[in-house]
Amino acid sequence: MAKVVIGLSGGVDSSVAAFLLKEQGHDLVALFMVNWHERVGNITSACTWEEDALIAQMVAKKLDIPFHIVDLSKDYKKRVVDYMFAEYQAGRTPNPDVLCNREIKFDTFLEEALKLDADFVATGHYCRKSETIVNGKPVFRLLAGKDPNKDQSYFLCQLNQQQLSKAMFPVGDLLKPEVREIARKQNLPTAERKDSQGICFVGKVDLPTFLQQQLEPKKGNTIEIDADFISKKKQVEVAEENYRKLCFPFPYKPWNGKVIGEHQGAHFYTIGQRKGLNIGGHKEPLFVIGTDVQRNIVYVGEGQEHPGLHRKGLFIAAADMHWIRTDLAMQPGEKRNYEIRIRYRQPLEKGTIHLKEEGAYFIFENEQRGITSGQFAAWYDGDELIGSGVIA
């Protein structure tokens, strides 16, 4: 059996993962990551690392496995939080959970695990791994978890072959209720503990307060764009089959609409956002349909079905294309059909990737709501996650 380091978080999923590995006879060591110390902007103090560490230690004691704590907060701040601030400053909306997995759990944490002579690193993610042979060499496949309501493969969409080769996902074949039941039967301290929410390792935060640690509030205009204006523009774009226009946010200008209020900084807002606009006098809710951090303008539209919220395509620059299955990487000039996801828990949507020298144009069968710059698009072939990239 292998020597496995389990990332024990203080949650039920990693606890049951540890139990299953112990049952399988692996030489198991528990390692708890401290990634964040500050509490600025935290909505609840119930998600502090001290409490998580205490619960994780209780689980390790119950399972009779060695327990260690490692402080990775410097790397986490530099590689996840600072990146997050920079992305918001630039008017994009990052996904810190994807970054956390790529940069911390399967990089810095993996390095710590290897210091303990680990053969593998295990986590409580709801996803699966398999192996196939291509040209005589092993190739690792990242597959969706069996539980369709909990599948977390999207969060691992930036992993590479080397990282996957060292990964184990013991709960990937289970449904969440089954995981809870195992925890109860084994009397694990996490059996009834609620799932963590919010930013990976930071917890549930008030995002504007959190961002104000680095980003200054700055008053600017909120401009409403009429739905008819967008609809007319779209008719022209679709008729032209202009990939560039279909795949990029519409370049709103101040004269395209009317000023209806003020905001505290365009970098605090994201596409599809409804809360925090504080503007009344409309029959239907207002939604953010665009931001301009240079001019410090937030563009809004009225109603859930405002055409500014929907787009036919997206673009990923060549440098931001990442293939988990490098043997399936496309070449410029190629086009291929995949199922695509643009956010966690979104149903897979059919689309075609057109790869050009400058990057990939993704054209969907149906318009997508809330395509957001800075987020990750991931593409699947059936259950298998093939690749991902940052939306331009």
Image (cartoon, rainbow, N blue to C red):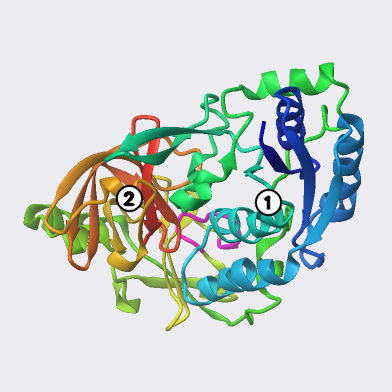
Occupied quadrant, residue 191? top right
- The residue that appears at 76% across and 64% down in the rendered structure is 41
* Labels 2 & 1 near each other (Cβ < 8 A): no
- The quarter holding residue 246 reads bottom left
Instruction: Name above or below for residue 39 compared with residue 12.
Output: below
Q: Examine the rendered structure and indicate whether residue 57 appears above or below residue 390.
A: above
The answer to which quarter of the image holds residue 202 is bottom right
Nearer the viewer's eye, disc 2 or disc 1?
A: 2
User: Which SS type dominates the magenta stretch?
Assistant: loop
Identify the residue at horizontal 27%, vertical 45% (top origin).
328
In the rendered image, the residue lying farthest to the left is: 240
Residue 58 as seen in the image, left or right of residue 215 = right
Which of marks 1 and 2 precedes in the sequence? 1
Q: Is residue 278 magenta?
A: yes
Residue 159 visible in the current orientation: no
Q: What span is in magenta?
A: 270-279
Q: For the image shown, how many numbered marks are present on the structure?
A: 2
Give coordinates of residue 154: x percent, y percent: 48, 44
Q: Secondary structure at mark 1?
A: loop
**Can residue 116 be seen from the camera position used here?**
yes
Question: Quarter holding the N terminus?
Answer: top right
Secondary structure of the residue carrying tag 2 is helix
Eyeballing the image, is 331 above or below 143? Answer: below
Identify residue type, mark 1: Gly
Image quadrant containing the C terminus: bottom left
Three-letter amino acid code at the position of disc 2: Thr
- In the image, residue 40 lies in the stretch drawn in magenta: no
Q: Which mark is residue 198?
A: 1
Label at residue 326: 2
